Structures are given as C-alpha cells and as structure tokens.
Image (tube, grey):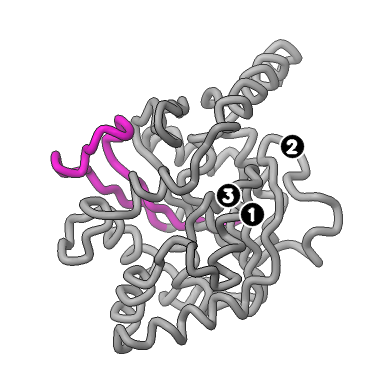
Amino acid sequence: MEKREEAGIEAGVAAMAQCYQPFDPAAYLQYNYTPPRADFSRLDSIVPWKLGCLHRAFTAGDICGGTLVDVGSGPTLYQVLSGCEVFEKLVLTDFLPQNRAALRRWLGDDPGSFDWSPYLRHVCQLEGRSPEAWREKAARLRSVVTDVLPIDVHRPAPLLPGALPGPADCLVSSFCLEAVSPDRPAFTQALRHVSTLLRPGGHLVMIGALEESYYLGGPGVRIPVVPVDQAFVTASLEECGYTVLEFCTYVLPADMCVGVDDVVGIFFLKARKK
C-alpha cells in the first residue's frame, strides 16, 4: 500500500472515530433490535433470519475449538447465542466504552440492561429445546464470557498485547468492518488486522450490511458506512487468506426499512482461514 493511500486511510479512520463518540447504545438497540426488525412471529424479519444463519453455522460440526472472539460486539449479544454452546471461552470486544459498559450490565444481570430473553427463547427453539430453557442459555453465556475488551480493528494488533492466551479458533463479527471503515481499502486492511487474531484453519463467521451508506447511532447521530457488495466482500476475504465456505443474502422487505439507515440487504458468510 502506498504511503499516500495509508495517510488517506488514517485520516478517514480518525474521522470515523469522531463520528462514533456520541453513539447511543440504547437508541441503537431500539432502532434495530425491537419489532419490526426483531419480530419473532415473522420468518422474513431480519433478526430471526440472522439467528437462523448463526444456528446453522455453529451446529454444522466443522466450527470447534476452545476460544471464540466476537469482533466489534457493539451493545449486542445475539451474535454469540449459538456460538456460546460450542466454545468454552468467549471474548467480547468493542471500540466504544459505552458499548462495553452495556455488555457488562447484561453480563452482571443488571435489571436495567436490554432484554435479550426473546432472542434466547428463539435460539432455544432452534436448538430443539423448550423456550423456557432460555434462563439456562443465559447462564451458559454468562459463564463462558471471560472478558469484554477494547479493540481497534484499524491497528495491526487490534487487541492489547497479551489480551488473548493464543490465537482464537473462531471469530464472529457483525456489522463492524463496513460500519467503521472510511472506504473499501480500509475495510480490507481492517479484515487483515482482525485475521491476525485467528489461527490457521480457524473459522470466520460474519454478518454485514449490503449497499448501506449510513445508519443512525442515536438521535441525530448519522454514521457513514462504506457500501459493499458480495463481490467485494468475497474478494477481500480471498485477499486476506480465507476460503469462503458459505455466502447468503437477505433483502429487506419494504416494512423493514424504518428510516434509521439505507441498507438494502444483509449478508451472512462462513469462511476458513488458510
């Protein structure tokens, strides 16, 4: 990468970091993780689709090991509800202290934290268990989360030295890289940085936005997003040393476009690091 391009990425990354300072976790959760986007009575609702993809990925039998790292957790936990059954150690990460605080509140069973019980119930059903087993699943998740760490995907070493005992066996990342990168080269560079956390032969499970240019991170907090498509994401993965095992997409129904972003669709992928 040329020095001029590197300087451009650095400037863009600094601008993105400023955009995120007023991010409001509670508002973001309200916008995206309540109905209609989280309507568990509808198969075409966004959240049930994502949970179904994650369930299939983590029950296929090829993803295994000791440690799962969730890259850029935000204030959300749905993305690790299936993975927490497969791994004994789960590390959550986010750049923003307010998001890490939101995660810790739920992990500490704070009654004021976001209610993830509908999600837990739904995933229990996917697993063939009674929805009433959701408390057991919540306890399982709390027991395997070993830390909530700061991360910066734009640094060659995204986590602080010694944060992990060794490379992770699996990475999960949801709506992170495209939402924190100023342009496509920065996305690919961030993917390369994140990949240093994963062992060879380990798996990456990723969910992201398709053709999105912005989303709201709170009232009046408009955050730019680099628009990506399947061809670009696949090419980035191959450039960073992955074999793509699965790539599927979801197109938003009209009533899921609720004015908090301009996303066209969502992608889900599973890849293996060479």
Q: Which mark is residue 93?
A: 1
Question: Could one spot residue 202 in this view of the protein?
Answer: no
Mark 1 or 2: the one toward you: 1
The percent coordinates of residue 249 (x first, y second) are 29, 48
x and y percentages locating residue 38 in the rendered image = 27, 57
Mark 3–mark 2 contact, CB under 8 Å?
no
- Residue nearest the viewer, comparing 93 with 155: 93
Q: Picture coordinates of residue 146 (x, y %)?
A: 69, 71
Residue found farthest to the right: 161
**Which kind of residue does numbered mark 1 sit on?**
Thr
First in sequence, mark 3 or 2: give its number.
3
Estimate how packed mark 2 is, as few (under 14), some (14 to 19) or many (20 or more) residues with alpha carbons within 10 Å: few
Which amino acid, by three-letter code, is at mark 2?
A: Arg
With 222 as the anchor, is 162 left or right in this view? right
- What's the mark number on residue 99? 3
Q: Quadrant of residue 53?
A: bottom left
**Span colored in magenta:** 246-274
Q: Is residue 144 magenta?
A: no
Residue 259: image quadrant is top left
